[in-house]
Amino acid sequence: MNVLLFASLKERVGKNQVKVQVTEETNVSTFLQNLFVQYPELKPFSHNLLISINQTYASPGQIIHPDDEIALFPPVSGG
């Protein structure tokens, strides 16, 4: 599964998308735990990371399917 990265997440990893192995349904929390194992440089963002599934913001318990589009965003601030 390709995971799109934006802003400081993209800068931290050095690319705008990463691959994460997802072979069955999982929830957002478990998905993020696996992501942080594969990409530990993203772990500092774990407490305030925004995730979207198919262009809709997701909650921690929401289910991710292997064919979903995932995007990760750092917290947004400014005016």
Image (tube, helix red, strand yellow):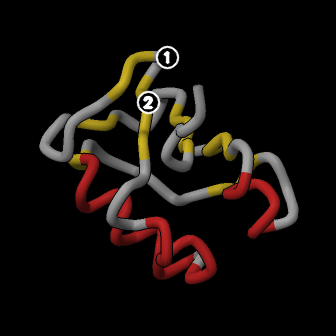
Percent of width and height locating residue 79:
58, 25
Q: Residues within 10 Å of mark 2 (few under 14, many from 20)?
A: some
Secondary structure beneath disc 2? strand
Q: Is residue 37 left or right of residue 58?
A: right
Q: Residue furthest right?
A: 14
Q: Is residue 65 left or right of residue 2?
A: left
Percent of width and height locating residue 59:
21, 36
Mark 1: amino acid? Gln
Q: Residues within 10 Å of mark 1 (few under 14, many from 20)?
A: few
Percent of width and height locating residue 78:
59, 34
Residue at 81% over, 47% down: 16
Mark 2: amino acid? Ser
Q: Residue furthest top?
A: 55
Is residue 14 or residue 2 the one in the foreground?
A: 14
Secondary structure beneath disc 1? loop
Q: How many marks?
A: 2
- 10, above or below 59, in the image: below
The image quarter in which residue 73 lies: top right
The image quarter in which residue 9 lies: bottom right
Is residue 19 or residue 50 the one in the foreground?
A: 50
Disc number for residue 73: none
Residue at 40% over, 70% down: 34
- 52, above or below 38, in the image: above
Residue at 49% over, 46% down: 75
Disc number for residue 52: 2
Residue at 53% over, 38% down: 76
Percent of width and height locating residue 43:
48, 76
- 11, above or below 76, in the image: below
Question: Do tag 2 and tag 1 residues touch (Cβ < 8 Å)?
Answer: yes
Task: Report how far apart the C-alphas of labels 2 and 1 lie in the structure.
Answer: 5 Å
Disc number for residue 55: 1
